Structures are given as C-alpha cells and as structure tokens.
Amino acid sequence: MQLRRIALIVVCVVASIVSYSQEDIVCGRPAIKFYNLQEEIFAGETSSFIARVLSYGYVDTLCALDYVIYRDEQQIGQVSDYGAVSFSVRRNGSSYENVNITEGAGRLGFRYLVFDVYAATLGVFDGYCPGNYNPNNPNGGRNRPFTFNYRIDDYGLYRIHLMISRCSNAGNDLYQNFTSIPDAEGCCDASSHSDKASGQCDNPVVIYECDMVFNVVSTKILTQPQGALVCAGESVPMSVVAQTNLETELQYQWYKDGEPLSGENSSDFVANGEGVYYCAIDDGREVRFSDEAVVAYRTVDVDTVRYICNGMESLEIVLPECDSYLWQDGTTDASIVIESVGTYSVTLTDAGCVFERDIAVSETPDYNLIAIDSAFFCYNDSLQVELASANLYDVVWNGNPECNQNPFVVRESGTYTVVAYEGGCQFVDTLVAVRGENVNLVAEDTIRHCYGGLWVSLSVDNATNIVWCGGLVEGDSIIIGSQLAYYDVSAVVDGCTYTDMFVEIGDAYPNTRLENNTYLYEIQDVDTVITIVANDDYDYLWGNGSTENYFAISCDTIELPYSEEVNYTVTSEMGCEYEGSFLLTIVQPVVVSDFECRAWSVAPNPSDGRFRIVGKEFDSAELYAADGRMICTVDDASCDFGYLSAGLYYIKVYIGEMFEFIRISIVK
C-alpha cells in the first residue's frame, strides 16, 4: 500500500532562488497565476486549470514559456505513457489554438494570426496591464490565458513546472502602439508599446518559475474531521467523508495521538478525551490519511499559591475574567481581599465549563532566590544558575525583560541581579560570578625549529592530567620532529580543563648534493678552473670565505696531484645553519704505453667496484689510483673493489716483461 498525505502546492520562484506566493506583485517581474486548481483527481478523470501570464510592466522584452512535467519527482519522457495533456490559447478574435503536449518537457507555442509564436512580448497575454486591476479574474485584461486540460491514468504525485525565460532576440512586430494602462501598484507606465513575436528564443535565461502540483489518487477525502475546544469530560463527534473510483468498500481506522483506536472502524467517530485524532482510509490500493483534528479542554489559569507579602497586612486576589464566580463565603466578585493565611475555595464558570480551585495563602517564605552569593567558573565553561523555586514567574535578570530564563546561563564575569515573583510577592537576589582567565598551555601558536628533534614543554608549571595528541603522549613535554604538523594538548590547571594547539614547522635537512661526495678531476691544462655548483636554494659560506652558491678553484694556483677536504656552512631559508664537507681531488692524466694490439679488457666498465679482467691469461696485475699511487696487487681475474671511493683507477696487467694499462671507472 502507498501512504500519501498531500496538499495542493503552488510555488513560484524568480531565477530559481527567491520564493513568491501567488499574491506577490513586483513591478518589472513577470508572474504566472493559476486558477481552477484541483488538489486531487481520480485516475482517468479529466481536469483543467488556467495559467495566466502577467507582465507587471515587463512588456518590451521577448520571452518564452517552457514546461517540464514530473511524476513522483522523476521527469517523464512521453506524456502518452501516463495519459494526455493539452492546452488551448486564443489566437485572435474568437479563434482558439488547441495544442497537444506529447513530450515531458518543451516550449509552449501557438499560432497567432499567421505567425508561429514560440516567444513573444508579455503584453500579448495581459494587454499591457489592464487586467491587473482585478488579478483574481482569469479573464481580465487581454483575455489570452493558457487553459491546460489533462487526464492522467497512472497514480502518483504530478508536478507541472512552468518557466518564463528572457530571450536575446528582438522579434518581429505584430501590432504597434498599445498604451499600457497605469495600475494601482504603479507597474504600468502609460507609455506606448508594441506586440512582438518570434518563432524561436535565442539564449534563453529563466527569470521566473512556478510549480502546479496535483495528486492522482484512487480515493478523495471530501470532508475532513473537525476538532473542538470543550469542557473537561465532554465528547466530540467527528466524521470523515471519502469517495473512491475503485469497486471496493472503503475501510476506516481512527487514531489518537498516533495510536490506532480498537473498534473505531466507521466513517463516524466520537472522540473522548484530549488528543490529536485522524482517520486512515484504505481502499485496497492505498491508504489515505485525513487531516488532524485536535480536541482540547477549556481551562482557566489561577495562581493557587499566594503570599501575604512582607510588610503587608492583606492580600487582594484577582481572578482572570470568567462568566461567573462563587467564593466559599458566598461572594460572587472576581476579586477578594484576604487578611489571614489559609485555603480559599472558588468556583468559576466560563463558556459553560465549571472550574473549582483552592488557593493556599501563606506568609512570604524566607529564602534566597540564588543558593550562593558568589561563584567561580572556568574560562571555557559557563555557569548555570537555577533559582530556588519552580513557582517563580515574571523573572527578570539585570533589569532586562528579555533575560527571563530559569535556569539562567552566565558566560562572563559580573554581578547579576534577579527579580522574580511568587505568590504575588517580589523577591530580589544577587550573584557575583567570576570567570577564570584563559590559560595558554603552549606559549606559541607556531613553533619553528631546525632539523632534528625538539622538546616542547607547557608554559605553566601547575598543570595536571596532561594529554598530548588525543592521548598518544602523556607528560609535561613532547618531542617534535622535522615536519609540518599540528599538535594538541589538554591539561587541568587550577581545577579547570584547558586545551591548546600549535603548528610545528620543522626545517628539513638541506639537500646540498655535496656532503660526503668525492670529486675527482683529471685535467689536461693547468689553467683550468674547476667549479662545483651547489643547490642555490640556500646560503653558503665556504672555507675560503666565498659566499657564492658554487665552489671554484684554479688549477694554476695548486700543485698537482692535489687533494683537499672542502668545508662549508649552509644556511636554510629558516636561518638554520648546517656544516658539510666533500673531498676534492685533481690530477693530471697518467701517461701509459699501450700495446699495438690490446690483450686485456675489463668488464663491466664502469662498475661499482666488482669487475673481471677479460682476455689472455696474465702473470700478475696491480691497481693504481689516478695520481699514480699503487693501491694493491691483483691476484685473480675476478676483482671486488667496492670499498673504494668513486673515481678513476688503472689496472696494470703483466705477462713476463710485457704489461698493459687498462683505465677503469668506479661509480657509486
């Protein structure tokens, strides 16, 4: 079964943003008004409504009328899948154009004189405002409304969405020199205007939208149950009248406060007791719910606790306005003067209902409205002040009638005075509230530090229950690393819980591309200048005092072979200083004699230090550095010199007195 409770909806919007009712009139903003709307129709039943376009002074711009049809908020494709929809509009004189709508979305067009009109100035429809004098008359003005006729065969909630779009093309003249008639709203300017139309709308921009919603049902509720305000104990007869187009008998179930009432299964019903009543009607296909009917008992508010206030010898009790009064002593006035404490009974009659009340009169109680005179609360908290009695009324804090809460919430330090009444007497009390100062657990919001770890401690000494990063770390300090991160901490200080947070910006170790490297240069010319370029994102200070982003040395100023450890200090963008060094070696090439026909080679070459001597068998071999220093003898064709630094080396291979030099390169 499908549960559906629906009321007729007509929603209009401008540019899909601002909602307007059917009564809104805004000069220069066109509108569409609906007439003869039906909230519900039976499946297969033919119905109609009128959509009237009103210019409200927007008369010289070409506009188009578009539509989209939805069923249960899903756009339909072909209208014939659900029924039939058409519209009629007056062409000229007494001639009408009838147009069938076949697509679920499109543009409304019709024949006007000899023109096919899909866009027109809006005066074509409302005659430049004369109909605005009577906006509730669908036939007022120029009498060219759209009459939509529809028959829907499939159940559901349907929505016809109509839009007025502004066009960029000017259109062609149909009629000229129509004078707009000024209206009461001042939308129409009494100037001369012309009808213009076109078979198309260029660059449409929606300026107004409206929805007409109707429900296609198998049962209509024709008469809704009605609630009532009655005397206590009285019953209220209710009824609901429904009609179905199905060949089934309607089933009824009455509810009170959302719960079904056993045995209440008729269209007529008698409500006993206060509550919210409604009826569910089941036609075998769907369940419809009636409107809610509220039954409430009449009452009269009488303050039944009264005091003879301090300093007063009597009390006048004044009752609310009713039809009649009868006090226990037989008096029938609306007021009575009391000179002694006790209980006084009165019977009131109003709108046929009788109310009996006992009024207890006593001396003014001796109590403070606020239990304490002063209070402290934490900076991040508030103080809730609850008054001593639940019977207080006309409560006013600090002389501001809008501050009448009980309990009252204090959020700032200050003196708070409350005035309240109970039993007709005034009470006054005062509270001094002190809010604690804010505590910054960490002194800085952003902590910047150089590469490496850094201990961060709290800025207060008396903190307890310290928790960092949601409980990941405990203790009064935390170590942070070289990264960008957020850290939070909570702690208790002087009984109050505080939270704080800081951002860490750690300096990454500078990537200089120099440190721990070995640079070996084999030069042919002593005039050579060797330049080692560093990363230019940092500031450098070299051992020779240079501050360039490169290290340079001229070979004519040194004695070859030359080897030096070059030291430098690099400063990062954050101002952090780091020290580094590298080994620089400069040699002249070793001059070796070669056989006319080479007997050996090395593979792989270059290598990481592991290689093999390939070729003829040899007697012995020796490994030399590029500067001519012998490093070691080689006893096997397979060699592993991975422990050596990267650079140039030579293998001297012997057979008897004959030898050959092989240059090798070790890379890392």
Image (spheres, helix red, strand yellow):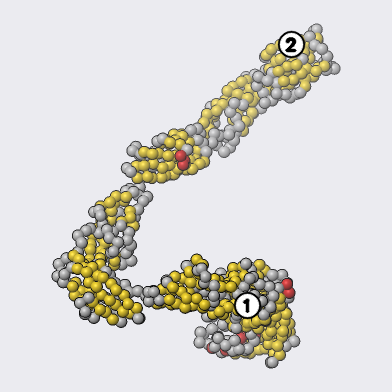
Q: CA distance from mark 2 to mark 1?
A: 111 Å
Give x and y (percent) for residue 96.
Answer: 70, 88
Along the line of sight, which residue is nearer the eye, 45 or 609? Answer: 45
Q: Quadrant of residue 355?
A: bottom left
Name the residue located 47 percent from the left edge and 67 percent from the top edge: 257
Q: Nearer the viewer, residue 274 or 599?
A: 274
The correct choice, above or below, for 490 with respect to 558 in the image is below
The C terminus - image quarter: top right
What residue lies at 27% left-to-right and 69% top-to-bottom? 304
* Vertical relation: 440 (above or below) 228: above
Residue 11: tell me if it is visible.
no
Relative to the observer, which residue lies in front, 20 or 643? Answer: 20
- Residue placed under numbered mark 1 in the picture: 244
- The quadrant holding residue 501 is top left
* x, y percent for residue 306: 23, 68
Which residue matches tag 2? 635
- Taking 56 as reference, is 382 left or right? left
